[in-house]
Image (cartoon, rainbow, N blue to C red):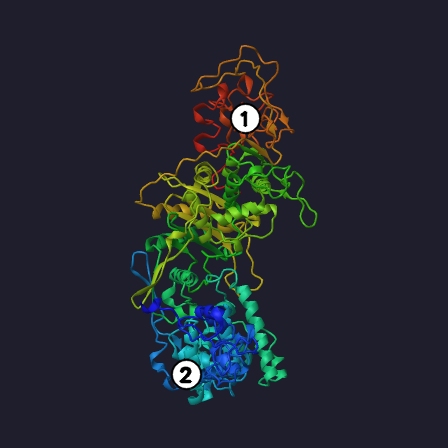
Amino acid sequence: MSEHRRKPPQPQGGGRAAARRAAQQSSGRRAAPGHPAGASGAPHGSYGEEPAFGSRAEARRAAQRGGGRRRGAAAAGGPPGKKRLIDYPRAGRHGWRRWTPSWKLVGGLFLGFVGSVLGASVIAYAWVDLPNMANTAKAQNNVYYWLDGSQMAATGGEINRQNLKYDDIPKAMQDAVISAENKSFWDDWGVDPKGIGRAFYNMATGGDTQGGSTITQQYVKNAMLDDRSQTVSRKAKELFISLKVGQKVSKEEVMAGYLNTSYYGRGAYGLQAAARTYYNKSADDLDASQCAFLAGLLKGSTYFDPAGAPEIDPKGATPEANTKRATERWSWILGQMVQDGSLEATDRAKYTKFPMPYPPKKEAKLGGQIGYLVDLAKANFINSNGQGITAKDLAEGGYEIHTTFDKKRVKLLAESVKKVYDKHIDPEKRPDTDTHVQFGGASIDPNTGAIAAIYGGQDATKHFTNNADKTGAAVGSTFKPFVLAAAMRDGVRDPAGGPEQGPESRKIIDPDTAIYNGDNKLKIKNFDGSIWHDENGKEWLQANDEKKDYGPIDLREAMVHSANSPFVQLGMDIGIKQVRQAAMDAGLREDSLIGADVPSFSIGISDPSAIRMAGAYATFAANGKQREPYSVTKVEKLGEIIYQHDDSGARQPFSSAVASNVTDVLRDVVKEGTGTNAAIPGRPVAGKTGTTDGNKSAWFVGYTPQLATAIDMYRLDDDASNKNRQFEEMFGTGAQPKIHGSSFPSQIFQSYMSAALKGEKVIQFPKPGDLDADSFYGGGAKSPEPTPTKEEPSTSPSPSDSPSTSPSPTPSKEPSEEPSSPEPTDDCSPFDPNCDDGDNGGGDPNGGQDGGAVDGGATDGQSDGGATDGGTIDGQTGGQPNGGQANGGQANGGQANGGQANGGQANGGQANGGQANGGQANGGWLAGRDG
């Protein structure tokens, strides 16, 4: 019989039950002895034997509960198990206590960690050598390149630094930086443990990485480390080097090294260069007040130089904001010096006026437009790179910056401005009107957003503000296209609804079928029809340029003639919030737009830059696709590309239909409106003029499919130290009664664009898309009643001097019982689905009311029979019986010689006294007039 089938031995005694119990024991275990008579039912055996378990799994479970052989042995009084070096999980504990480390374990681990860190620190400290300062902070050029790859400028060549010996450094400067930066400087070991802990905590939590460095650490970072990254490894390296510097280098040497290597802005490294740059004096001639200012610059010249850095941060680094910050920090440092005992209170009391430094100057090689171009490219790179490269890093040199600037177009734009300035502006002859005249301009490729050219001023070494950037000059009526775009995209609100309305409650506007009241001093209303009042309870009466009354006028004609009142009321009907958003979607910066929701917002009281205006109009030129303006294509260092412009950021905030209709309306502005001086023969041009209240600025912004350009003009004192300077009026400037956007700005635009596009292919704008919009009457303009069906034959009371080129409409069989001149109605809301606006062709919304042009003929300046605002809509099919405007409309013979005979406009216009050849002769709209 095989072994595994052999019957197990029977126990001695116990009967069959005992035999069964023995058979149930694991074959690999020794059977537990039977209980002697009288023994208790204890679960363990006597004489140190292990407890019996039904299976190995049960044994494991028992061990996990704290049982097991060792515990059983201990409980039985046997020898204890071998102790573990780390008692974890803890033996002899149950539940959560088993997993709670003992104080002995925690203390041991902490001491071990501290010992490891100290050991590693000692090793790192021993291995770290002081870097050779001769191999750091090397002076290099930054080279800027034109679009064609040729060199535009090389800045630097040598870092502007002149080292000072410790004995030559003013004590006031040492005291100022100690009070401002590191009060324990003379006593510390080169590091501040609290500051380091704070810096590491900030890095771990994503907070500010600055504020933990001593003067010694900053000296090490400036002079001994090429790595500028804000990383833990770089901080650790800085820490160990600073400790060694603190032990091996004297405090005097550290102080001199710190002040000689620090960056003070404006390209100045070191105290001596800073003293020359800001105060045009040697460092040993600085007083305590000037030292306090220079010490404040060490916190960051971008935000503490009173000259400002708006090209880097247009909102936060303005001259005004920087001057305020610099003044506060200057005063605080002087106060700390008194508190620290390094400056007597009586001496502090002498310094009551902020020591304003001289304005910045540029190197001669950055004269003309080059300095403006370099500053613009520098700002673009600093704001766009993802490596954290700052203005200070860039000042150290070694970068190759490739720009979008077209050398030819930059030159052409400067020449176009100079030609107008030299011909018309004469400060010596007209000092009261021609001084402080400034021009600015920018030209952008709509298809890429690349800035092709700018005009920043006459000379970057003499005029320090870049006029192509934000200057504070309001844009005037060049803002109206954004209002029109909002009307076509967002629509006007339902007067019966609330202020916030979605698309389902709004009505889309078509510039050709939306009629608004164009009267001068129009009383502006809220969208719900209530009178708008300002915070003082006053009403708003919107004026038009030259106090013109236009009467009911469609938005296309209102744009062509730059009427203000229709667009102000339109903006209120849409909502200023939506108008502001449309302007931002086109490309304007929010910080350049007035924050108040006032009626005049829609006619350009905001002050975007020429670059941003050109970029926003470029959105319409690109058929609704918006691209951010940029001036740097790529940047290289040591032959490696470290930055490249990303072209993937284009958006489509406006549909093709909206953008193409804006363009179509602006083309009419150039063809027959206020922008005729900007027309380029043989090329389609769209654009808009702009002039502000008080005649303090004038603009022309326009575009072709290939190029968008903005030109502005204003008068502003160049002396930034003049705290009372403000924009001055331009009445009489250039021997002109008034400067409009249609005068000098549009002339510069035309001259530059004609030359810049010479030889380029002529590309046409897309045809305007369908807006699917119904007629609309706003701002008090009244919709006409439906034309009666009974009409008299259309016969002229007097024969026309020239025959019509188109046949007259077939006369009705039944004569009209009364003239068909429409009567206005007040009870027809465009939001009422049951409202019938009637036939728009039956009346003359642009020509007046009650059957004739206002004042019996041509309104305000259209003598000898010119129809107001360009004539009647759609040829007046079926309107004006008897061949004219009933009740004596259009006195002095109506529209003679081919006017509106037989119900139409002969030959497409109003010849011989009407609007022949795109103009309004005999007192109509002269080229050069602007709203």
Amino acid found under the numbered disc labelled 1: Asn
Left or right of 580 in this view: 403: left
Residue bearing mark 2: 120
Q: Where is residue 439 shown, x and y percent of the image? A: 46, 54
Q: Separation of disc 1 and disc 2 at Cα?
A: 89 Å
Task: Please provide percent x and percent y for residue 637.
Answer: 32, 67
Q: Residue at x 40, y 50 (%)?
A: 444
Name the mark nearer the viewer: 1 or 2.
2
Give the x, y percent position of residue 745.
45, 48
Residue 387 visible from this viewpoint: yes
Q: Quadrant of the N terminus?
A: bottom left
Check disc 1: other Cα within 10 Å, few if <14, some if 14-19, many if 20+.
many
- x and y percentages locating residue 871 in the rendered image: 51, 28
* Rendered view: 727 above or below 255: above
Q: Identify the amino acid type marked 2.
A: Ala
Residues tagged 1 and 2 counted as in contact (Cβ below 8 A): no
Badge 1 is on which residue? 840
